[in-house]
Amino acid sequence: MAFQTQVTTRHVDVSDRVREYAQTRTAKLEQFYDGITSAHVILGEDNSPAENKTASINIDVYQKRLSAEDAASSHEEAINLCVDHLRRQLEKYKSKLRSKDKDAHR
């Protein structure tokens, strides 16, 4: 079951290639947990000189929103860092769901 991915940019123009990259990378999160209902990717620029490309990804799962935000020298790198953070969050969320305590996911 595929989920909807929305890509938003803030004060920056990005190519269609970067938008497609963000959609394909967030779609791969479904390998770790298939209960994702939607994803929202926000791309922007920071004022700091070194790492000025930022990415923020919010994904909605059952009764919870997981989010990650990171900065790097390119949007692709920032997206990769966010996806890695979300992968770890999804694995932790999934293990809580599978625990014997019924109310662990709340």
Image (cartoon, rainbow, N blue to C red):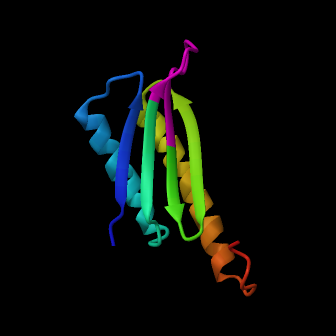
On the image, the x and y values in percent for residue 6 come to 36, 48
* Residue nearest the observer in this picture, 56 or 77: 56
Question: Would you say residue 85 sits in the magenta stretch?
Answer: no
34 to 6, vertically: above or below: below
Give left or right: position of 10 versus 23: right
Image quarter for residue 41? top left
* Residue 46 among magenta residues: yes
Residue sticking out furthest to the front: 63
Q: Position of residue 29 (x, y in %)?
A: 44, 60
Q: Above or below — where is 96 with respect to 42?
A: below
Quadrant housing the N terminus? bottom left
x 64%, y 78%: residue: 97
Q: Please provide percent x and percent y for residue 9.
A: 39, 32
Q: How many marks?
A: 0
Front residue of 8/15: it is 8
| Percent position of residue 5, x then y | 36, 53
Q: Which residue is rendered at x = 38% and y = 37% of the image?
A: 8
* Residue 34 in the image: above or below residue 79: below
Please identify the residue farthest to the left as the structure is shown: 16
Please give the name of the residue rendered at 42% of the width and 21% of the height, measured from the top-left corner: 11
Q: Is residue 2 left or right of residue 30?
A: left
Magenta stretch bounds: 44-56
Q: In what quadrant of the picture does the C terminus appear?
A: bottom right
| Residue at x-position 44% and y-position 72% | 34
Image quarter of residue 28 = bottom left
